[in-house]
Amino acid sequence: MQSAGNPRILCVGVNYRPHIEEMGREVPDFPVVFTRFPSSLVGDGEALIRPRVSEQFDFEGELAVVIGRSAHRVPRERAFEFVGGYCCFMDGSVRDWQRHTSQFTPGKNFDRSGAMGAVVPAFRVPDPRDLTLVTRLNGEVMQQGSVRDLVFDIPRLIEYCSSFMELQPGDVIATGTPGGVGAARTPPVWLRDGDMVEVSIPGVGVLVNPIREALRFKGRKAWFREADCIQSDDPAPVIIPGSVAEELGISETVADRDHPEALPVLTAAPRAAASAASA
């Protein structure tokens, strides 16, 4: 029954009025709940991966609630008794995939497309309604909102979610995002390789993540940009599948100083560079 080692991640959509308006939706009668899988999230400082299949990778800064003890059919009056802590949350969204159907799941679950920050114990946040949230992209403020502006507040969300499932310690409820998302801007603002996105909630913390392009090749412990592994002058270290080693050309095993956790790695020499060297 314990979720601490394998948390369920519940996210709430369209829960700030400015975001509801900018997305052209109606105020819902009930919380709009969808799920994210742990594989879709990284931690503070880790790279968010922009999928190759879409140009519409968007940011959504949020406050997340972490459940502290088992909660089943909890009345809103007692909801805060079951909160273990709070953290910053980046609900990275691939908009076109999110809109394929009425279900959000595909657009919210690309691997490493979202992030979750360090958890602050609940006793350090006397009243979460006093919290404010700011999302910055490359230092520029893109979103700003007060938790008081939630359509469904934290007690209501816990009451609702604990009615259809027994919440366990470690489960997460991401409460929604304010207005200002990239999809609603003219022209739209999409996350790009090299961008830096930051979610800041004074009293809770700061979550900062760089954006990296998804690769054609993925190692087991690290992701690299395609531009980094296909260079003619100075090939960068990258883990690649053995099945493509012959096609690309492989030189010596080397150490990657930027990603020591990924050792050992191989240097991929592009076929064009190999041909030039042999000419």
Image: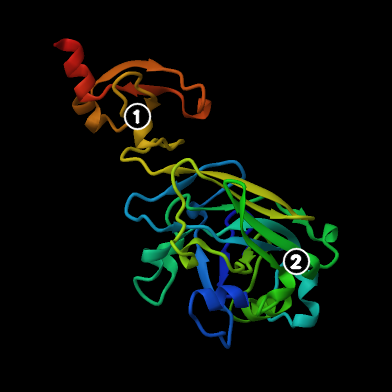
Amino acid carrying label 2: it is Val
Q: Where 218 falls versus 205 (above or below)?
A: above
Q: Secondary structure at mark 1?
A: helix
Q: Residue furthest top?
A: 278
Q: Is residue 154 left or right of residue 184?
A: right
Could you tell me which quadrant the C terminus lies in? top left
Mark closer to the chain start, 1 or 2: 2
The residue shown at (34%, 29%) is: 229
Q: Nearer the viewer, residue 190 or 245?
A: 190
The residue shown at (57%, 52%) is: 115
Could you tell me which quadrant the N terminus lies in? bottom right
Q: Report x, y in % for residue 135.
A: 62, 56
Q: Report x, y in % for residue 206.
A: 69, 49
Q: Residue furthest left?
A: 279
Residue 229 marker: 1
Q: Residues within 10 Å of mark 1 (few under 14, many from 20)?
A: many
Q: Nearer the viewer, residue 251 or 271?
A: 271
Residue hosting label 2: 83
